Amino acid sequence: MKGRWRACRNRSILPERIKPAIAVRVAFAIGPAIVAPAMGAAAGIFNILGPILLMIGLGALVRWRFHLDQTTLARINIYFFVPAFVFDKVVRSDLGWATMGGVVAVTVLQVTTIGMVVWGVGRALRMSRSTTSACAMATMFYNSGNYGLPLAELAYGQRGSAVQTFVLMSLNLLTFTLGVGVALAGGHGERRGMWGVAKAFLKLPFVYMLAAALAARWWIRLDPEHHALPAVLMKTSGYVAAGLVPIALATLGAQLVNRPRRPRWKPVSFVLVMRLLAGPIQMGLLLYGLHALASMAHGSGGMLEATTRALDLWPWPAELLILTAAVPTAVNTLLLTMELGGEADLAADCVFWTTVVSCATISVWLVAIPWGLRLMHG
């Protein structure tokens, strides 16, 4: 009886002794296969997001230490760096005309559809019109300039920034047209406020620089061997364009220093989810749906096939558009809300907290988007 008990006890103990050794061998066998890709992904995220966060932090530090004038910083961006950047990237871009039009059309479609969703949810939850308006503005219009352009440049280089230039143009146009209507729906401003905002849009130099860049690009492509812009113009635009990324991010950091306070968490949380999570998901579904529609219309001929082909941006630049749809709320939403008598405090909180939280969510999207596209395409 004692011998049988000892044998049973030894059999029960033996696996417990073997388990650690097996676990160590398995860890050494599969560890590199897991750790190496994870380390590579972490390094990639750090190389893209690290410079963005560092430049934002330096801008905040300089603003706090030397009390720099934010208005001057914003004007340097809008009137000096952004126009040169737009001109340089559009002229040098190899994007086709159909792709340019497709990027603009998809951006307009995405902004309007997510705006309708937010407005519908806000009314269903019995939010006040002013709160619903502020939430819709914060979700629809994202920071495609100070945040989106540097992110596109660092993540995808020249081809990314060229596409993002047209997203920037579309969003600015929508902000000062559709955005005015949304802000008026929840504000108490008079119609002269709307006209003042419209005039402000027409004063933005990047609008006219974009038109000049498109005209120059068309002229060059008529005869690439003999048509070229003067070297002094191209070198100047290139030098100034190279300064946009650090100045834009430093300006964003300087703007954030003024907004640390306890927010209204319910509407702000709603905006965080819709802007940073639902926004890129909705953009991805929209782009894939248009791709499927183009596949079905292939071979049909006529206007339908031409239109769906122009809107088929899958998988590139869909990858970029999904990523930059995850950036935080644009500062222009705060300016419009203040101009037209809306909930300016809520708008300011949405700009601040979406920017802070995006540091984490952008890291996730930088990994998830390429991984998802590889999974879909085998």
Image (cartoon, helix red, strand yellow):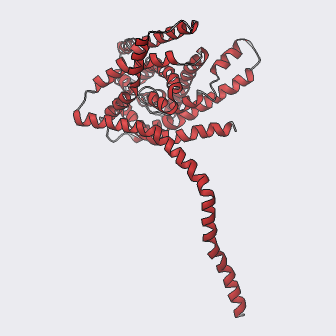
Closer to the camera in the image, 121 or 249: 249
Quarter holding the C terminus is: top right
In percent of width and height, residue 310 lies at 64, 18
Outermost bottom residue: 1
Quarter holding the N terminus is: bottom right
Q: Is residue 81 left or right of residue 310?
A: left
Closer to the camera in the image, 142 or 220: 220
Relative vertical location of residue 31 with respect to residue 217 in this rendering, above or below: below
In percent of width and height, residue 12 lies at 67, 79
Determine the residue positioned at 52% across, 11% down: 217
Q: Is residue 375 left or right of residue 181?
A: right
Q: How many marks?
A: 0
The quadrant holding residue 192 is top left
In percent of width and height, residue 165 lies at 48, 21
Relative vertical location of residue 371 with respect to residue 311 in this rendering, above or below: below
In percent of width and height, residue 180 lies at 43, 19
Determine the residue positioned at 66% across, 75% down: 15
Q: Is residue 101 left or right of residue 63?
A: right
Relative vertical location of residue 44 with respect to residue 238 in this rendering, above or below: below
Q: Is residue 5 left or right of residue 70?
A: right
Outermost left residue: 66
Closer to the camera in the image, 51 or 32: 32
Q: Can residue 358 be seen in the rendering of this structure?
A: no
Determine the residue positioned at 51% across, 22% down: 162
Q: Can residue 297 be seen in the rendering of this structure?
A: yes
Determine the residue positioned at 54% across, 6% down: 226
The quadrant holding residue 30 is bottom right
